[in-house]
Image (tube, rainbow, N blue to C red):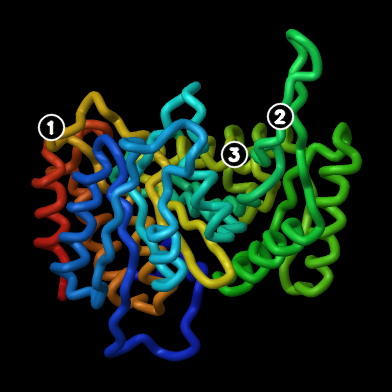
Amino acid sequence: MGSRFGSVGRRLSSSSAGKSFRATLFPGHGIGPEISAAVVKILEESKVPITWEEHIISVDNVKPGQDIVSREALDSVLKNGYALKGPMATPIGKGYRSLNLTLRKELGLYANVRPCKSIPGVNTAYQDVDVVTVRENTEGEYSGLEHEVAPGVVESLKVITKNASLKVAEYAFSYARANKRKMVTAVHKASVMKLSDGLFLSCTQEVAKNYPDIRYEEMLIDNAASYLVSNPGRMDVMVMPNLYGDIVSDLCAGLIGGLGLTPSGNMGKGCMMAEAVHGTAPDIQGMDMANPTALLMSALMMLRSMDLHDTADKIAKATYTVLKEAKYTTKDIGGNSSCSDYTKAIIDRIDV
């Protein structure tokens, strides 16, 4: 089986055969520790040469307004170059800075990549989905610049910079070329936000000139959403500012069965962080019911960025076999098996 989700992120200059790696592990909250343990077990049984540095991120003993993510944890990722993150929850309305935004900004993770491809055995409205969203990860409406102008009037600033836009556009086109994709679509709303989205488009246009082998087009965000739910085969690789990417990537996940099946990788200049983007599901915490597929597929993106393609492909093949057989799948995708049984079924089908 080929690399289902493509080559992504931080690539080594030569073969990784015989090499060992260190990676930072953030188990996360809620079901995070359970699915993280399942993924680590699958990788260990597959003889993946990774030594883990585990860091627990918690609001305990941290006052509102203070950073929840320690400098030690951030330095661990920067030193190792790789991280795997379970789902995390930031307390809402209590003054804490978003955990995910903190990690992305502090680590310089400028591009979020989510490949969404139909999975045999998972029944959805479409069986031919094969799209990739590349989302600018550090600015836009998520810059955190808000203030109250007057009582009852709040202003939120959208920041688009040439530097960030060029970087994410370059990543999208290089990803498309590396994975033999045919088209990159810049998704925008420059018809209304003429300066901000206009700048983003000028950057994608500039980068597109260097990739004559890749078809380039521009599409309004509303039109892109319409195509995705009516004819997803029309789309290929999409690159877009932060907020649009947040929404569209979740929409694409719904096309293939939900966030519990969708991989996600955050790419930076010197590191990458693979993550599960679904929620912490506290209602099933500790009940051995969680589905580790999304985190596992994200971990496979990390393995491919380490050039461990053969190992990633073997694990992917085993996972898709289990999903297609539908004998040991979890409740969220129509099965009745536990997380432990699903994990064991994958391990039993890996050809080490």
For the point 64% across and 50% down, which residue is it?
138
**Mark 1 against mark 2, which lies toward the viewer?**
2
CB-based contact (under 8 Å), mark 1 and mark 2: no
Q: CA distance from mark 3 to mark 2?
A: 24 Å
Label 3 secondary element: helix
Which percent across, then down, holds residue 39? 23, 56
Q: Amino acid at mark 1?
A: Met
For the point 32% across and 53% down, which residue is it?
26
For mark 1, what is the residue? 287
Left or right, 167 with respect to 123, comes to right
Which quadrant holds the N terminus? bottom left
Residue 248 is labelled as 3
Q: CA distance from mark 1 to mark 3?
A: 31 Å
Q: Earlier in the sequence, mark 1 or mark 2?
A: 2
**Mark 1 against mark 3, which lies toward the viewer?**
1
Which quadrant holds the C terminus? bottom left
Q: Residues within 10 Å of mark 3 (few under 14, many from 20)?
A: many
Q: Residues within 10 Å of mark 2 (few under 14, many from 20)?
A: few
Which percent across, then down, holds residue 307? 40, 79
Q: Earlier in the sequence, mark 3 or mark 2?
A: 2
Q: Amino acid at mark 2?
A: Glu
Classify 288 as above or below 298. above
For the point 84% across and 43% down, which residue is it?
196
Residue 209 is labelled as none
For mark 2, what is the residue? 146
Classify 271 as above or below 310. above
Q: Amino acid at mark 3?
A: Val
Label 1 secondary element: loop
**Towards the viewer: 306 or 69:** 69
Q: CA distance from mark 1 to mark 2?
A: 40 Å
